[in-house]
Image (cartoon, grey):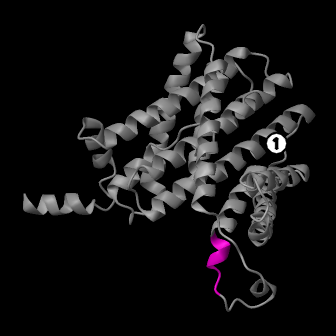
Amino acid sequence: MITIPTFVLTMAAAGFFGYYILGLNVMQSAIVGSILGGTSSAVVVPIMKNLKIGNLPFTVLFMESAITDVLAIVVTFSLINALTIGHLKTGLILGNILSTLIVSTIFGVGGGAIWSVLLSKIREFPNNLFSTVAFIFIVYGITEFFGFNGAISALAFGITLSNMHKMPEETPGVLNKFTFARLKSSEKLFFQELVFLLKIFFFVYLGLSINFSQLRNMMYGLLVTVVIFLFRMLVVKFFLPKKINIRDASTIAVMVPKGLAAAVLATLPFELGLINDIAAQNFVYSVILFSIVLNALLITFLELPSPIKKFYYLFFSNFHKVPQETEASKKK
């Protein structure tokens, strides 16, 4: 619904600044734009869990953060390859995106089903808490070895592992012969601690990467970030189903933080010598930083009585009213 329009408009905004402000050529600007096209699941998911939003908005944001990582990776690598060989094949890019999504999901679902069967046996061994993580690394590595996206396979693995035990007993075929285990609460808590550690290392890496001596490029990054958030508002207003309430629509509109995928991809063109201007890299890191900060601030303002909340609610007035607010307005 909103994934592709957000990615395209973000890519266009960042690419425009890369071309006209940073002095990059068209292909280099497109690479910078594709790097910043995705949203960060490391930032989006924890915030969503602490907000009371509906199931549909939660699913939209969760899937968007996963899919846009794939888009950013595939499009960036395709553009880097095009810049290297001297021509761009649009059909090849679209084919790579579809094949990556489908095959990576197959690897993840297959791995999740296999591990769900083996998990009850693995628990009979001592010190098995890290075994699930180790198996995820195996699935991730195999997927990457064949040229697909390990992150999508890991996502499919998690979804499969947490839902295989819910399959009805009358399921026909071979699956009916197996008993599927589920993760224990202690194992889920262990994963939460690992995610917390990874987020800490990500923000440390981001802080180390930003060069504050280039304040002009940082200001450009702030300006692009504001433009991206404005584009996001338009995308949500025109592409999101109107059955979603106004509060959830406003929340979705501010959920465009950039993250780990963008930070890692930002190093590739410079390591390969395709973009030699360090200002462009600092520009990318600035957008990542400011998008996370602005996302956190806007979420806070939307949860409080504030002019920003009134502005967003007015802009998204064509969406359903929040039930509590509807009752309050009737009393008035």
Residue 128: x percent and y percent? Answer: 75, 56
Q: Residue at x 79, y 86 (%)?
A: 177
Instruction: Determine which quarter of the picture holds residue 323.
Output: bottom left
Is 276 situated above or below 33? Answer: above
Q: Which residue is mark 1?
A: 78
Q: Nearer the viewer, residue 208 or 147?
A: 208
- Magenta span: 163-168
Left or right side of 329 for 69 = right
In the picture as drawn, the residue positioned furthest to the left comes out as: 332
Query: Circle 1 — which element?
Result: helix
The N terminus, quarter of image? bottom right
| Quadrant for the C terminus in the image | bottom left
Asked if residue 89 is positioned above or below residue 23 in the image, the reply reads below
Instruction: Give the percent coordinates (x, y) of residue 325.
Output: 21, 57
Q: Quadrant of residue 17?
A: top right
- At 84% across and 53% down in the image, what residue appears? 138
> Is the stretch drawn in magenta largely helix, strand or loop?
helix
Q: Is residue 322 left or right of residue 167?
A: left
* Dot 1 alpha-carbon crowd within 10 angstroms: few under 14, some 14 to 19, many 20 or more: many
Residue 234, given in percent of the width and then of the height, sits at 45, 47
Residue 200 belongs to magenta span: no
